[in-house]
Image (spheres, grey):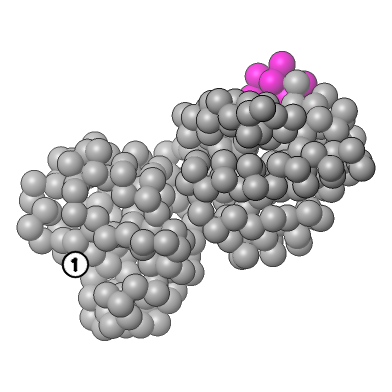
Amino acid sequence: MNRLDGLTVLVTRSDEAGAMLCQKIEAEGGGALHYPTLAFAPPPSMAAYQAAMAQLHQQAWLIFISPQAVTATLPELLERWPHLASRVKVACVGGATARALQAVGIEQVLCPDREWSSEGLLNMEVFQWVQGVNIAIIRGEGGREKIDRILNDRGANVLPVIAYQRVIPNLPPEKQAQVMASMAEKNIDIVIATSFSSVENLKKMVDQAVWPILQTTPICVMSERVQSLAQEAGFQNVWVNPSVSDEAIISLLVRERNRLCQMKQQR
């Protein structure tokens, strides 16, 4: 028997990352439905973005909040990097972002070893004493402003670089119908959502007729903060898995497979 036999997982990650996680779930014998609840668009103000990017050479640190922060800045970043490499240090929140940076030739990247979150980065010794230090935080609109605020409170000169905005995807009608039917028939055992934006958009995207079913379906998020926000939004069964890596998610699903199958029988 495969490790995820009998389990059906709804994956809300966007595009390639979501498709890759689905493939890994299916390789373990599980069923996976890819229902991206997050897409990315250019920044709300291109002029503000370009003005911020023009100040990168004045920074001591560049902090990338997500892989999308790397993707969204890539052309300008690579153009400027030969002049920045000897001047700035680079940090990021998680392993996927570190790999995205290393893939384009930015090899020296500071990243938390275990706690892949803004909190994990803020807890690192190098960011405890930042009085007067220029730090650019490259992220999406409405992202983790907490990191901006805390570094400001510690005395840093923070430059927000808003490189993209999160939007609700425009999915094909057949995909929407397929997922709504699976929810209505209670075929989904657990939902994977790696950010609050994806949780929030999921609630907006589902048909109201299936919302009561989705409310009680286990949904796995990646931090206690997102857990609290998801509960406030009406999700009743919110689990926390502290790592966003595919391997950690698969391990959770394997570990909880029997419990999830039993919960399915009770619904």
Nearest the eye: 98 or 79? 98
Is there any visible trace of residue 32 in the rendered image? no
As drawn, 145 above or below 197: below
Q: Is most of the magenta stretch helix, strand or loop?
A: helix
Q: Residue 121, percent across and down?
A: 38, 67
Does any portion of residue 41 appear in the rendered image?
yes
| Residue 24 x, y percent position in the rendering | 53, 30
Could you tell me residue 13's position as x and y percent? 56, 38
| Residue at the spot 58% in from the left edge and 61% down from the top edge | 223
Q: Badge 1, how many Cα within 10 Å: few under 14, some, many 20+?
A: some
On the rendered image, what quadrant is the N terminus found in? top right
Q: Quadrant of the C terminus?
A: top right
198 falls in the magenta region: no
- Between 117 and 248, which is closer to the camera in this rendering? 248
Q: In the image, 137: left or right of 30?
A: left
Q: Is residue 174 magenta?
A: yes
Q: Quadrant of residue 230?
A: bottom right
- Find the residue positioned furthest to the top: 174
- Return the residue at label 1: 60
Residue ID at (75%, 21%): 178
Residue 12, above or below 80 = above
Write the residue at 49% across / 43% down.
Answer: 247
Q: Which region of the structure is painted magenta? A: 171-177
